[in-house]
Amino acid sequence: MSLLTAAAHSTEADGSAAGVTVAGWGTALPARRVTNHDLTQHLETSDAWIVDRSGIRERRWVGPGESTGPLSVAAARAALARAGLAATDLDVIVVATTTPEKPLPSTAALVAAELGTTAGAFDLNAACAGFVYSLATASALVSSGVARTALLVGADTMTSIIDPGDRATAVLFGDGAAALVLTGGPDDLGQPPPPGAPGLVASDLVGDPAGVDLLVVPAGGSARPASAATVAAGDHYLRMDGREVFRRAVRAAEASIVRTLARAGCTVDDVALFVPHQANARITDAVLARTGLAADRTSSTIDRYGNTSAASIPLALAEAASAGTVAPGDLVLMCGFGAGLTVGTALWRWGTPTQFDKEAT
Ligand code: ACO
């Protein structure tokens, strides 16, 4: 056993140690359920093709009044309620999204305004890896003492950038949001958390620049601002080379997971719960086969929600946490990949809110 392994196992993370804790979590999904059968009414596709190629059976799509902002607010309220905290307790809000409520201001600023908090707020766009990037960012703010309480939201309304007539993408994506409240940080003496404390154990944030053109919304940014011509050409919609994304995502996710576990001095057997980005059940199966991670300790929502981009990992994590699947001290491995290509893996030790955190209320 290496020194790092010994450290990772030396302290029971029972909530008594300083660190960063998930104090609460919440989800928000549009009411409208769209089944594969529904899609066959206007697309040349079939339930069998979609299930066989992706594992998706249904997804949620927004209706009137539902979009990234309101979904984020609803998920945030649920997470704060579970944490027993008020919005005014928040120091920072990070919203991971690739489909913001508006180009400006940030969705996080809109969430802060709706919740009634003066917390610092910013969006983070790392596509479907956005939640892992945001978790690394928000937990760094908390563990360093910059913020004591952080709200982290993963939210996307993928239907806002999907061509409803493109069967190659329309069947894969869904809308949704999920939020975590993180609390903790250095103790009153400013000491860093001891080994075994809850929070980020190891992470790996990397890119695959050769895949930068594989998932693109061509227009609507500063290079090609939206115009009647870009809309007429459908250039405000997502274009994807699915087969190449699949190939690269599997290899990149495997490599990132291997690096992350090595940094922590852990093996796949130490992972209590694996929460992969929910893009395609076949991608997850391939990653499990290559890494040796256990299928029965892998969280899956792909059949019910499809690919919800930055929301997919926190949705699956929140469902697992609500089902009591994770216990204090457990190691949770999360891995996301998406446009860019961006890849992010986080190994997180689950904890319970400490007395220190509770006093912040
Ligand atoms: N129904 C029926 N047939 C379809 C459909 C559909 N919905 N979509 C495509 N087809 C057809 C294609 O036209 C093609 O037909 P052809 O052989 O006559 O040309 C055939 O099915 C096979 O198409 P492929 O694209 O080769 O199918 P594949 O097995 O690769 O599966 C899929 C496609 C599901 C998109 C897969 O490649 C995939 O999941 N890729 C990863 C995509 C992904 O994860 N994207 C999100 C990344 S996260 C982010 O940042 C947004």
Image (tube, rainbow, N blue to C red):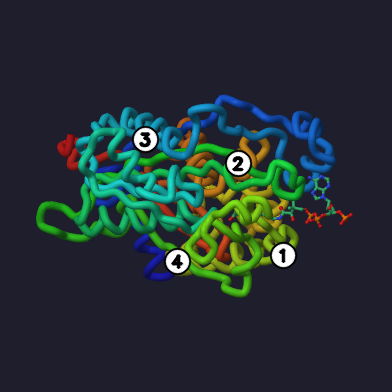
SS of the residue under disc 3: helix
Q: Residue at x 64, y 41 (%)?
A: 306
Whether disc 3's CB lies below 8 Å from ligand 1 is answered no
Of the numbered discs in the image, which one, if any, rests on residue 265?
Answer: 4
> Picture coordinates of residue 85 (x, y %)?
25, 32
Of marks 3 and 4, which one's residue comes earlier in the chain? 3
Q: Are marks 3 and 1 in contact (CB under 8 Å)?
A: no
What quarter of the picture does the N terminus occupy?
A: bottom left
In the picture of the structure, the residue carrying the numbered disc 1 is 244
Distance (Cα) linking label 1 and label 4: 32 Å
Vertical side of 27 occupied by 171: above or below = below
Of marks 1 and 4, which one's residue comes earlier in the chain? 1
Task: Say what amino acid the circle numbered 2 marks.
Answer: Thr
> Picture coordinates of residue 188 (x, y %)?
11, 52
In the picture of the structure, the residue carrying the numbered disc 2 is 159
The answer to whether residue 297 is visible is: no
In the picture of the structure, the residue carrying the numbered disc 3 is 76
